[in-house]
């Protein structure tokens, strides 16, 4: 039995209940918030919590209508009452010196954070001491942003911090916040290591995401039938390969990306290659090992990194271990619901017949059949690995060793959101032991700030940001104040290095194309979306073809072959993406900088980024002819938009400028 919620990406696997007599038991640590949840038995059906009368409606990714869920309300009433002066707020101030969320290092800086109930404090000061003589002082902490319940404060100080105390100004009172909370004047001693000042390559990086089968076909395809309908795309093979990708590396490099991400390249049963048969062999259909070696060579020549999709949540039925299970009955790899020897012989016979066909096509099973093993999405085609088994963990480590040895720069863990934290941590530590500068990205589809970033993963896919950008800029279901709350909360709940490394994406091989979603407001709203994607903290990622305005509905239509006919390109959008990539390269503040967000009204949001002596301000409005009053004395350069006596005029609802002096307090708007 699993608990399924937003903190598990609405997917079973991350948290499994322990059996205690006739009950299931699980202890979780959660931040304050509202959490819809269910119990999932064997990874299939969802069940409400009969002991909880609180309910809500949730629309799942693949469902047409919302379904009922149990609702956990964690701490929100306390914060709401404190903000309304209906209760004391002292015990609601949050800082944990043991957590990298609240104190961590980035380059030469130590970053410290403090959370408070909204509107209860006028100012927060940080008094700190360094390790060397003369290091330390007192600084005013910046209000990063606020949501419905909290104010999020942050301070960047140069060097390592030995001890510190917060000072909270409440009107004329100055209250200390020390080791034992509000009212205690004893300094806090952090446990964070004063480690290397080197900034990892993935902080503020830019990714070009390629679905291998769909990018470029360069070699003759044998043994499989190719699809004939591209738009809308049919499921099946187009025939894209690694040779084709290598030929187009100059296109990717000239646009200005730092890294490419490839979907699986292994011997598999289908065109998407997530049903892996052999993790240690490059599929001959895409060129095999030699083509992979040549691709790596091309990437290294251009200084591009390679992140490889690794599939460790499940395998194909044709995987050697599953075939051994069917033949011998010994299970040391999979999550079984019943022993194979007790399974109806007709089911085993059907599975064997399917395997004999290379796991291609469909299995013909009786209606209502549920696999005797857990599987990806309950389909039965991809049996789930059991990471509590030693053979699985040894297998995954061999796999990681093998591909790092081939020269990849890191991995994106497919369905990483459903692998238990302890095992993700084990794999993370193992990779760092082998290659410290190899990145671990976890697939997380919902609730990324509920995952242990900076502890068992360096980064994750930020679908939450995608969802909010679409709701704000395209669907207009939320306003700028709600967008501010989301951005401040997400940024402040993730360690600084990971906050600046989240894979911020507008689309992927699992989502409809952004142009198709934005048909009614294209191109203006999509330009605003990409603008925010590139100036917000994180690592912007472009899904192949989105930069030229490709269209497509959900899987498999979002996997149409790349359009290489330039007459069909949206060249204005392509040039705009190229300009944003150039701004990222030019401005360190956009890659490494601190962050503040502020909504000016329901329609307009501002983003400030600062790093050392570089200060950048971005403005986005739903209105294309918006202007903002701004002190011209602080402007160094207007990069997008224009400035006159009236104020800052937005260009198509967008403005970007560099500022001269460091900003203190709120942005001057």
Image (cartoon, grey):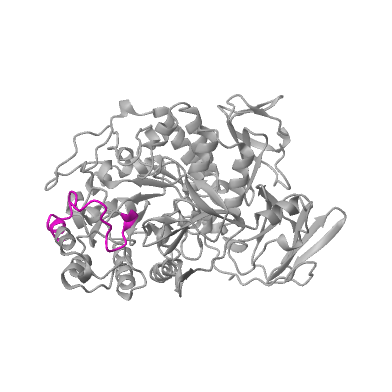
**What x and y, as percent, mark residue 119?**
75, 49
Vertical position of residue 259 compared to residue 617: above or below: below
Kindly indicate the quadrant of the structure image that contains residue 95.
Answer: bottom right
- Magenta residues, dominant SS class: loop
Q: Is residue 183 left or right of residue 192?
A: right
What is the x, y in percent for residue 372?
A: 27, 63
Q: Position of residue 115 (x, y in %)?
A: 68, 57
Q: Residue at x 61, y 49 (%)?
A: 488
Residue 67: horizontal and vertical position, in percent?
A: 46, 46
- Looking at the picture, tell me which residue is in the foreground, 293 or 150: 150
In this view, 628 is above or below 61: above
Image quarter where the C terminus lies is top right
Q: Quadrant of residue 403?
A: bottom left
* Side of 191 where 185 appears, left or right: right
Please, which residue is most extreme toward the right here? 172
Please tell me whether residue 362 belongs to the stretch shown in magenta: yes
* Res 657 visible: no
Which residue: 45% across, 54% down?
9
Image quarter where the N terminus lies is: bottom left
Q: Is residue 429 magenta?
A: no
Q: Is residue 228 visible?
A: yes
The part of the image, by quadrant, that contains residue 300 is bottom left
Which residue occupies the foreground of this view, 182 or 550?
A: 182
What is the total number of numbered labels drawn onto the structure image?
A: 0
Q: Which residues are magenta?
A: 352-378
State left or right for residue 318 relative to residue 449: left
């Amino acid at each position: 039995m699993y608990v399924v919620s937003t903190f598990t990406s609405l997917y079973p696997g991350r948290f499994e209940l322990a059996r205690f007599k006739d009950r299931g038991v699980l202890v979780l640590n959660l931040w304050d918030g509202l959490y819809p949840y269910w119990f999932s038995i064997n990874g299939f059906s969802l069940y409400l919590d009969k002991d909880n009368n609180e309910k809500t409606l949730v629309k799942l990714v693949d469902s047409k209508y919302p379904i009922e869920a149990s609702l956990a309300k964690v701490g929100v009433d306390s914060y709401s009452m404190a903000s309304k002066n209906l209760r004391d707020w002292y015990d609601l101030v949050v800082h944990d010196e043991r957590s990298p969320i609240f104190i961590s290092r980035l380059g030469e800086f130590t970053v410290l954070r403090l959370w408070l109930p909204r509107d209860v404090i006028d100012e927060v000061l940080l008094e700190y001491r360094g390790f060397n003589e003369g290091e330390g002082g007192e600084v005013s902490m910046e209000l990063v942003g606020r949501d419905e319940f909290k104010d999020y404060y942050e301070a960047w100080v140069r060097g390592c911090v030995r001890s510190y105390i917060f000072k909270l100004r409440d009107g004329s009172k100055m209250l200390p916040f020390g080791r034992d909370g509000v009212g205690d004047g004893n300094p806090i001693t952090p446990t964070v290591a004063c480690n290397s000042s080197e900034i990892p390559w993935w902080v503020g990086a830019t990714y070009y995401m390629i679905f291998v089968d769909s990018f470029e076909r360069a070699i003759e395809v044998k043994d499989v039938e190719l699809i004939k309908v591209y738009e809308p795309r049919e499921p099946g093979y187009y025939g894209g390969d690694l040779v084709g990708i290598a030929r187009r590396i100059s296109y990717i490099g000239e646009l200005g990306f730092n890294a490419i991400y490839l979907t699986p390249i292994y011997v598999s049963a289908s065109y998407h290659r997530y049903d892996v048969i052999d993790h240690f062999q490059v599929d001959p259909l895409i060129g095999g090992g030699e083509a992979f070696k040549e691709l790596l060579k091309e990437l290294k020549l251009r200084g591009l990194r390679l992140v490889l999709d690794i599939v460790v949540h499940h395998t194909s039925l044709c995987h050697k271990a599953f075939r051994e299970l069917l033949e011998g009955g010994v299970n040391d790899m999979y999550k079984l619901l019943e022993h194979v020897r007790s399974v109806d012989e007709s089911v085993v016979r059907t599975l064997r017949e399917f395997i004999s066909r290379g796991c291609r096509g469909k299995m013909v099973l009786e209606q209502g059949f549920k696999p005797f093993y857990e599987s990806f999405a309950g389909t039965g085609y991809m049996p789930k690995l059991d990471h509590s088994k030693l053979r699985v963990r040894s297998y995954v480590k061999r796999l990681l060793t093998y591909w790092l040895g081939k020269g990849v720069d890191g991995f994106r863990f497919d369905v990483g959101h459903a692998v238990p934290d302890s095992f993700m941590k084990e794999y993370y530590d193992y990779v760092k032991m082998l290659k410290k500068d190899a990145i671990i990205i976890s697939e997380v589809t919902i609730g990324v700030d509920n995952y242990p970033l900076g502890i068992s993963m360096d980064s994750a896919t930020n679908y939450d940001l995608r969802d909010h950008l679409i709701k704000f800029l395209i669907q207009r279901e939320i306003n700028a104040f709600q967008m501010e709350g989301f951005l401040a909360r997400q940024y402040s709940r993730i360690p600084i290095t990971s906050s600046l490394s989240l894979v911020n994406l507008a689309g992927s091989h699992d989502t409809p194309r952004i142009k198709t979603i934005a048909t009614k407001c294209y191109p203006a709203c999509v330009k605003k979306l990409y603008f925010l994607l590139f100036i917000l903290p994180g690592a912007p990622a472009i899904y192949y073809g989105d930069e030229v305005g490709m269209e497509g509905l959900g899987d498999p239509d979002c996997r149409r072959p790349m359009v290489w006919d330039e007459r069909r390109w949206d060249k204005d959008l392509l040039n705009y993406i190229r300009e944003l990539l150039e701004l990222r390269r030019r401005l360190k503040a956009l890659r490494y900088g601190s962050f503040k967000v502020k909504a000016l009204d329901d329609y307009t949001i501002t983003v400030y980024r600062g790093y050392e002596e570089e200060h950048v301000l971005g403005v986005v409005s739903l209105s294309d002819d918006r202007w903002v009053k701004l002190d011209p004395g602080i402007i160094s350069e207007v990069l997008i938009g224009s400035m006159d006596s009236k104020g800052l005029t937005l260009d198509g609802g967008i403005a970007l400028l560099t500022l001269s002096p460091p900003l203190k307090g709120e942005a001057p708007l």
